[in-house]
């Protein structure tokens, strides 16, 4: 299932979300301009390596990506869910929220891979936090989703809580299934970073102050 757009309106322009997307794209274009050996050194220096942890790498790693599909997928999810979360948090608080989710996601990943020397990059942990916040605040918003039906593709409007909780369950059980497998030392998907980021987003949105106008706006329901 591929989410295409949501039906929940936002009432302010998502400046921070657009800026984050732009920074990620620019960072990837910079990566793309490098020779292979330069890129390997760059990722090793600015990505998070659990066995050689440095706090500065936590921030730089969430603006780097391992390929075009990695970048496009992450930025697409951020574009769908980020505007509404930014709308209710306000621009400055949303930026803090995004970075905190990225830090939390990274720390959970490190907790489960403490001896790994494989660099980890990507914004998916921070974006998972945005998704966690979205499901708390807009559970009944409908997500227009591309769904395969046998050999055909069709679109369906699915409640946000269904598609996002389904996504979370997949991440959790994929992470559990990966524990102890040797491929963790060779790279792959940081499943527990997604889990950690999502849970951080749920927790943070419950304690952070949201814009007062959100309390009075109608929610799009299934």
Image (cartoon, rainbow, N blue to C red):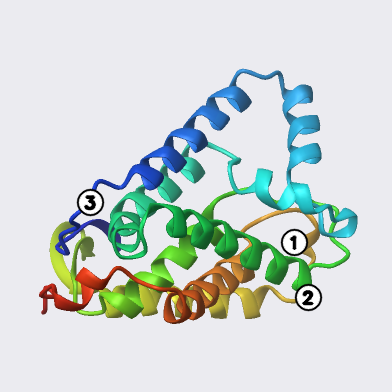
Quarter of the image with the N terminus is: bottom left
* SS for dot 3: loop
Q: Is residue 119 left or right of residue 191?
A: right
Left or right, 184 with reference to 67 = right
Residue 118 visible, this angle: yes
Q: Is residue 119 visible?
A: no
* Percent of width and height locating residue 6: 20, 61
Residue highlighted by disc 3: 12
| Res. 183 mark | 1
Between label 3 and label 1, give the one nearer the viewer: 3
Residue 27, quarter of picture: top right
Query: How far apart, in angstroms, are the residues tagged by discs 3 and 1?
Result: 44 Å
Residue at x 59%, y 63% (from the top left corner): 100
Residue at 34% from the left image edge and 71% from the top image edge: 210
Q: Position of residue 115 (x, y in %)?
A: 88, 64
Element type at mark 2: loop
Q: Residue at x 56, y 73 (%)?
A: 195
């Amino acid at each position: 299932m591929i989410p295409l757009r949501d039906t929940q309106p936002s009432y302010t322009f998502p400046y921070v979300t657009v800026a984050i997307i732009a920074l990620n794209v620019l960072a990837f274009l910079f990566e793309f301009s490098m020779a292979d050996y330069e890129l390997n050194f760059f990722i090793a220096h600015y990505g998070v390596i659990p066995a050689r942890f440095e706090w500065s790498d936590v921030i730089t790693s969430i603006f780097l990506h391992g390929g075009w599909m990695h970048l496009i997928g992450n930025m697409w999810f951020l574009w769908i869910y980020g505007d509404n979360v930014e709308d209710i948090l306000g621009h400055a608080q949303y930026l803090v929220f995004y970075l905190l989710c990225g830090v939390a996601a990274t720390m959970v990943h490190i907790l489960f891979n403490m001896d790994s020397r494989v660099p980890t990059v990507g914004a998916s942990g921070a974006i998972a936090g945005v998704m966690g916040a979205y499901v708390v605040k807009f559970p009944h918003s409908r997500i227009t989703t591309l769904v395969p039906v046998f050999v055909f593709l069709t679109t369906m409007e699915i409640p946000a809580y269904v598609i996002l909780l389904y996504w979370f369950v997949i991440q959790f059980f994929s992470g559990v299934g990966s524990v102890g497998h040797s491929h963790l030392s060779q790279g792959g998907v940081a499943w527990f970073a997604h889990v950690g980021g999502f849970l951080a987003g749920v927790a943070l949105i419950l304690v952070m102050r949201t814009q007062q106008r959100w309390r009075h706006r109608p929610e799009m329901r299934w």
